[in-house]
Image (tube, grey):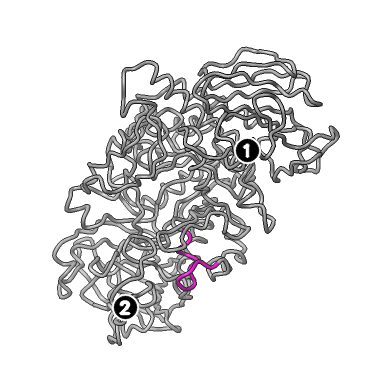
């Protein structure tokens, strides 16, 4: 085979129409062999001829798009930590496509067994063939963003409106039926669970299960093959792009959940698939005097070492690739605290943050952190740099606690409703910093949150030990499904309360796919290994009433910019009315003082949002004026009277929303100073009428 010296960048196999350049970082390895496979599986090995620093490279005019390849790497064993072994075929860490499956077996523990028969192949990809047509990013402002967290397969596998051949695939996500559903909810961004190529753990294989969620990455550039027809990794590249193109046409952004904190190679006994065999001492944080163990900040067996410049380069190259070549609009970083540990401690000035902040491409997309990991000091909600938004775990816990009736101050709930300024109002951060959520893929669904108090994860084969026990859920009096009409009505109301709270809060709301139609996982709060009806959305069992309610409250949010402020409330006079931008009232209609905030009863209060006191301007500098809103939340079990404020506020109000009923509210006018009845455990939203 003809071999030229080639170039050290970009990493991976890059076809330019003339030849394929191959480059791989392999640290202090002594040899790096490119392994080529024909359709019969026969292997040809060619040493990469040149080296620039620690990157090995070569250019191959006869290596064409579609070719299958891998690496074998060898080196001189040093004091500890090296895992070079040329009997192990390695996936290219920067492969743009990967085909085939990992077949776990005895080769995992036998260092002398050739792993090639059991390994996937990397594939050379021609990225220039795809026609993006007139694709344009929606570029939805953060304050107008509504996120929908979904799994590619689970979203569409049981959807009757998706063509059978597209169910469970990228093309299914962008089918007209799914897009129409998303748009009806006011969704502006779909956040997809991991689509980087991932593999299942050996333990799951032994149990006959698979890693369904995908938080077990092995290829940071390759879209997961199982979401394309015939599980074809090469087809997956174009199908993913076609999905993005179609979603963009509908005005919907694509955000990827990415897992750069660990890899599928696991702990010391895990398989050698890619990184470990290329340069174990560079890619991972090693532990012990002999460096044979792994530092584990993730609970998954290893931690990728982003302190190493070449590892950091791989991650940022991957991110830029998904933005420039795959046109995605942002990322949600799994266990993001682990990415920013410069030593053992979290570091807000880590190299990872610095590189992202100065990068002209990455600094311009949506960046969302899951601001915790499993190591000491890992919970960092509110402590990420200004460029970032964060999954707000404090919001989730506080809202759940209030509606399940747990003891706690109303002041904490008020902070969450107002965008969590106590966590984010510093360094120029704004309400967009908080991604508010009540449920996510990890935990109970909304329906199960109101149906179960105890998890049911037996199907995972771990004797129900997995999954959190801190669900903060309430079954409304009976564990599991019931025929009791009163309990079912209460559960329905609680679901409306939770969705309404989410969409009436300042910040960026995130809905879990299926919550809008009361999808259940039958009490499982950890469906990571359930690639079946437990995790797939059951569209046939849709709660039409809850769906219509969700659409209505989402539309109400879009119609009222006072619910989508770009700046935090100040609690002082603003605008021509001379009234405070926000005010709080107890059931008597009087302003709440410090003592009221600490009372455990009554668990009810009203929040006045002054629509004439929005401090920010529109996109062309125009003044934004909205109706004033009065939002009453009652966590009391019984109905009570609530007096509408009369001291200089609006003279009359109309009821726009009442979660005590699933039906659209008839027009009802109320005068200032009037006492109205609020049903137990409900939200009433009033709009100024004069």
> Helix, strand, or loop for circle 1?
helix
Residue at numbered disc 1: 597
> Helix, strand, or loop for circle 2?
loop
Q: Position of residue 262 (x, y in %)?
A: 37, 63
- Residue at (75% x, 19% y) in the render: 672
Dividing the picture into quadrants, the one containing residue 197 is: bottom left
Residue range highlighted in magenta: 336-347
Q: Is residue 182 above or below residue 205?
A: above
Q: Is residue 582 above or below residue 367?
A: above
The answer to which of 76 and 545 lies nearer the viewer is 545
Dividing the picture into quadrants, the one containing residue 674 is: top right
Left or right position of 62 against 418: left
Q: Position of residue 506 (x, y in %)?
A: 63, 40
Q: Mark yes or no: residue 247 visible.
A: no
Residue at numbered disc 2: 288
655 inside magenta stretch: no
- Residue at (64% x, 35% y) in the render: 596
Q: Position of residue 397 (x, y in %)?
A: 48, 43
Q: CA distance from mark 1 to mark 2?
A: 51 Å
The answer to which of 61 and 537 lies nearer the viewer is 537
Left or right position of 365 against 333: right
Left or right position of 129 against 467: right
- Are discs 1 and 2 less than 8 Å apart at CB? no
Q: Mark yes or no: residue 396 visible.
A: yes
Q: Position of residue 427 (x, y in %)?
A: 68, 59
Q: Residues within 10 Å of mark 1 (few under 14, many from 20)?
A: some
339 inside magenta stretch: yes
């Amino acid at each position: 085979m003809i071999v030229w010296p080639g170039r050290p960048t970009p990493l991976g196999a890059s076809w330019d129409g003339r030849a394929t350049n191959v480059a791989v970082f392999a640290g202090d390895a002594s040899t790096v062999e490119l392994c080529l496979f024909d359709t019969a599986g026969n292997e040809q090995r060619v040493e990469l001829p040149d080296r620039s620093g620690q990157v090995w490279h070569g250019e191959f005019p006869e290596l064409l798009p579609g070719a299958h390849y891998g690496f074998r790497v060898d080196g001189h064993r040093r004091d500890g930590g090296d895992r070079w072994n040329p009997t192990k075929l390695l996936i290219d860490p920067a492969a743009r496509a990967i085909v085939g499956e990992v077949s776990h077996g005895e080769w995992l523990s036998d260092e002398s067994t050739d792993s090639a028969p059991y390994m996937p192949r990397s594939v050379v990809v021609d990225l220039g063939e795809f026609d993006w047509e007139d694709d344009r990013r929606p570029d939805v402002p953060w304050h107008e963003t509504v996120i929908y967290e979904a799994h590619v397969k689970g979203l569409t596998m049981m959807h009757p409106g998706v063509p059978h051949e597209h169910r469970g695939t990228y093309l299914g996500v962008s089918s007209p039926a799914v897009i129409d559903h998303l748009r009806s909810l006011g969704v502006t961004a779909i956040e997809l669970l991991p689509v980087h190529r991932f593999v299942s753990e050996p333990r799951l294989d032994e149990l006959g299960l698979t890693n369904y969620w995908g938080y077990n990455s092995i290829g940071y550039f390759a879209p997961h093959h199982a979401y394309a027809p015939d599980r074809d990794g090469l087809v997956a590249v174009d199908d993913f792009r076609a999905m993005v193109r179609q979603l963009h046409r509908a005005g919907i952004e694509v955000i990827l959940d990415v897992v750069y904190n660990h890899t599928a190679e696991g702990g010391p006994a895990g398989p050698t698939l890619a990184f470990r065999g290329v340069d174990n001492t560079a890619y991972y944080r090693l532990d012990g005097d002999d460096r044979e163990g792994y530092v584990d900040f993730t609970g998954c067996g290893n931690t990728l070492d982003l302190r190493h410049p070449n590892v950091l380069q791989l991650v940022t190259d991957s991110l830029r690739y998904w933005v420039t070549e795959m046109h995605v609009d942002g990322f949600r970083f799994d266990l993001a605290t682990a990415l920013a540990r410069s030593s053992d401690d979290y570091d807000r000035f880590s190299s990872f943050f610095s590189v992202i902040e100065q990068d002209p491409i990455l600094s311009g997309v949506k960046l969302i952190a899951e601001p915790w990991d499993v190591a000491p000091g890992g919970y960092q909600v509110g402590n990420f740099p200004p460029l970032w938004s964060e999954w707000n775990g404090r919001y989730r816990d506080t809202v759940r606690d209030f509606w399940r009736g747990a003891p706690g101050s109303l002041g904490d709930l008020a902070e969450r409703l107002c965008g969590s300024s106590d966590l984010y109002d510093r360094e120029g951060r704004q309400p967009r910093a908080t991604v508010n959520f009540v449920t996510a893929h990890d935990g109970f669904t909304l329906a199960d949150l109101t149906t179960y108090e105890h998890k049911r994860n037996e199907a995972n084969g771990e004797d129900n030990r997995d999954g959190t026990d801190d669900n903060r859920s309430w079954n409304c009096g009976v564990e599991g499904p019931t025929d009791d009409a009163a309990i079912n009505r209460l559960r329905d109301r609680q679901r409306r309360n939770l969705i309404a709270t989410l969409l009436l809060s300042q910040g960026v709301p995130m809905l879990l796919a299926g919550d809008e139609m009361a999808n259940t996982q039958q009490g499982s709060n950890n469906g990571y290994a359930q690639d079946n009806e437990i995790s797939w959305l059951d569209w046939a069992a849709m709660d039409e009433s809850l769906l219509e309610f969700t659409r209505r409250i989402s539309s109400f949010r879009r119609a009222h910019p006072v619910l989508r402020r770009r700046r935090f409330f100040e609690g002082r006079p603003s605008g021509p009315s001379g009234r405070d931008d926000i005010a709080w009232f107890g059931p008597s209609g009087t302003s709440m003082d410090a003592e009221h905030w600490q009372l455990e009863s009554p668990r009810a209060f009203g929040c006045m949002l002054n629509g004439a006191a929005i401090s920010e301007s529109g996109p062309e500098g125009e003044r934004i004026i909205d109706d004033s809103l009065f939002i009453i939340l009652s966590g009391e079990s019984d109905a009570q009277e609530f007096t509408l404020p009369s001291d200089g506020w609006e003279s009359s109000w109309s009821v726009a929303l009442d979660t005590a009923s699933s039906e659209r509210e008839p027009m009802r006018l109320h005068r200032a100073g009037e006492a109205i009845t609020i049903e137990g455990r409900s939200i009433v939203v009033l709009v100024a009428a004069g």
